[in-house]
Image (tube, helix red, strand yellow):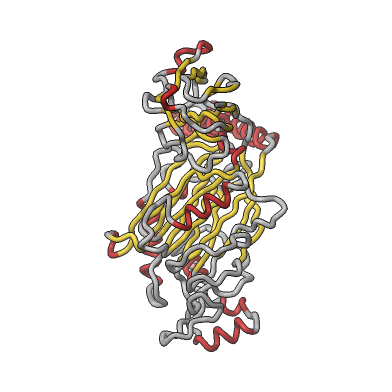
Amino acid sequence: MPHRKDLQKAIVVAVIYRIYFCLLYESVSESFCTKMHKVSDKLHHLSVKSAASKKYDTLRVFLCTWNVGAAGPPKDLTELLDLKEEQLPDIYGIGFQELDPTDKDMKDNQWTSRLTDELGKINYVRIKVVRMQAISLQVFVKRHLLLHVSSIESEYSKAGMGGWWGNKGGVSIRFDVGGANVIIVNTHLAAHLEEMAERIEDYNVVLNTQKFRDPDVENILDHDYVFWMGDLNCRLENISRDAALKCIENNDLDKLLKLDQLKKAQQEGLILVDFQEGPINFKPTYKFDKDTDNYDTSEKQRIPAWCDRILYKTHVDIEGLHLTKRKYFSPAYNKGDHKPVSASFDVNVFTMEANPFVIFDPINKWQYGQTQKFHYKIRCGIEPDSSPWDYIALYKADFKTFDEYRTWVYGKNNAEDKGDKGVTLEMKGSYLKEPPGKYVLCYISKYKNWLRGMSNVFEIVG
């Protein structure tokens, strides 16, 4: 959001000058200090007035976390994804822990493939997936939002065995949308009741080791909206299993929540400081006899606990940012030994005006097997500049991920220097032997692999 950043920078510069000159000339010119006060006050007033008069757009974000215990997806994902809602979310962020270790592929494992297929049927596109051993996170957005999403990155942090092993730790996906930046973090922290200190250490490993290439949001907590979820493994202290089960039976959840390690550690400033959580009105999500609704009856007789959580943090010091929590619930599934947890939020963003970096000339029809030319222009003054490694790819119009291109060509380096003249490229007929149907061209930036321009939908005919 250049306008917002420029105002903030102006305020910072004015304040610095105020301090510097007041210290330097305090004994010489009191009136000068007064003038500097007025300048910075006016700049601050301008910033507040601009924010107050600005109209914001709202996006709906849906998150889900589930320790699946190596189980595969259920037959029906309707409740997991809250698909019966009248207004479906704009963005899905779905995180897993303990994926099947034999199903190792990051993108083609059974969970990611199933979600991509199911959400693709209702016009969502997967913009990113990241996996570290059995911990995975994927983000999907509605197709019409693709050109509003930029600067997509992912990171991962190993916390197991002193940082050598990725069975514990976290993965994240960050992106910009509508002038605001968002990060979703999915973590699996150390297990066992007595290991709260190790859980805090794992949290700090994730928080302190993940770095991003965007200079404005280098760290996790720099983002406008931070969502932190996963199997945080926090337990209930000072209660027996029988007493906990009695509270659950009587729906006395408030009594149990007073014994929750996470809430205690937050109050003491040890973990997830300044993060908030929706009201917990669902039963503890751990631990169950596998594939049942029965709390652990094994020899270990584990005490039920809310291991699986979704928390959030908003930079309230930035005018216009606002988050409204809508739902926080546990969908009714009995796969594995944990229950999933889902949450939805409405978040403000600054603008949803389409402003693509690359503008394609309209395309009518292409002929199967024949070389075809296309033309595009690049708008100057939008960072980053074009690169010789950027590429233009041909996709079916209903593509579900950016990996599904049919063919591609490299873009023209420094195409923005061509101005209104633009660039004409071609795709060879030998590579255009695609079945007749509807297609689209996408300009993909090699920098962070994000979409920077998309053509109209056109037909390839036989």
Closest to the observer: 101 or 267?
101
Q: Position of residue 402 (x, y in %)?
A: 47, 39
Q: Is residue 322 visible?
A: no
Question: Is residue 8 shown above or below 233?
Answer: above
Question: Is residue 203 shown above or below 256?
Answer: above
Q: Position of residue 37 (x, y in %)?
A: 57, 32
Closest to the observer: 412 or 151?
412
Residue visible at 43% across and 51% down in the picture? 108
Where residue 397 sits, quadrant-wise, is top right
Question: Is residue 441 shown above or below 83?
Answer: above
Q: Position of residue 35 (x, y in %)?
A: 57, 27
Residue 410 as seen in the image, left or right of residue 51? left
Which quadrant of the rendered structure holds the N terminus? top right
Q: Is residue 150 visible?
A: yes
Residue closest to the far front: 462
Which quadrant of the rendered structure holds the C terminus? top right
Residue 373 as seen in the image, left or right of residue 131? right
Closest to the observer: 272 or 180?
180
Where residue 99 sits, quadrant-wise, is bottom left
Residue closest to the far top: 421
Residue visible at 49% across and 21% down in the picture? 381
Residue visible at 47% across and 24% down in the picture? 369
Q: Position of residue 97 (x, y in %)?
A: 44, 63
